[in-house]
Image (cartoon, rainbow, N blue to C red):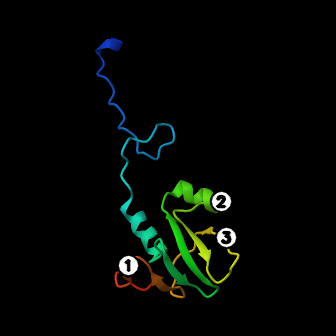
Amino acid sequence: MTATPALDSRPPLPRRPVPHEKNPDRPAPAGARPHPQRDARVDSEIGPRTVDAIYQTSISTYEVLAVIRDPERASALLKRSALFAVIVRDIMRVDAEPYAVGDTWTTSDHLVLLREGRTTQSYAPAA
């Protein structure tokens, strides 16, 4: 019969690696990296809508008051899951109040004006 080894004689088990920042049981590490594909996707969905831009859709013409890129704030403003939100004001209505939209930039949207010396040449048409 063979003798069973004492507990002290066994080598320690390997430690688990630090989990990915999306694991809910541990806090996210400080300085987590932004996801480059998500940033490119959000940029393409926002399009040329920057602060003080005026754009036209098939419904009306809007002035962009703010662009929110924080997913938590955007989700709170839109009351749904969202990566971004754009706060706009309908300039075709006199009594229009600002509100948040999460619509993507499409081929039916047209940039009318970029204020403060911005140019439209850096934006490609939507696909």
- Along the viewing direction, whichever of 19 and 96 lies nearer the viewer: 96
Q: Is mark 2 on a helix, strand or loop?
A: loop
Say which residue appears at 64% left-offset and 84% top-offset. Answer: 92
| Residue closer to the observer: 62 or 33 | 62
Q: Looking at the picture, which amino acid does disc 3 mark?
A: Glu
Find disc 2 in the rendering and name its residue: 79
Q: In which quarter of the image is the C terminus?
A: bottom left
**Residue 97, numbered label:** 3
Label 1 with label 3: CB-CB less than 8 Å: no
Q: Callout 3: helix, strand or loop?
A: loop
The disc, 2 or 3, on the residue closer to the chain's N-terminal end is: 2
Is tag 2's residue or tag 1's residue first in the polypeptide sequence?
2
Q: Mark 1 points at which residue?
A: 118
The residue located at (32%, 12%) in the rendering is: 8
Q: Nearer the viewer, mark 2 or mark 1?
A: 1
> Is 46 rendered above or below residue 71?
below
The amino acid type found where label 2 is placed reads Lys
Specify whether 36 is left or right of 106.
left
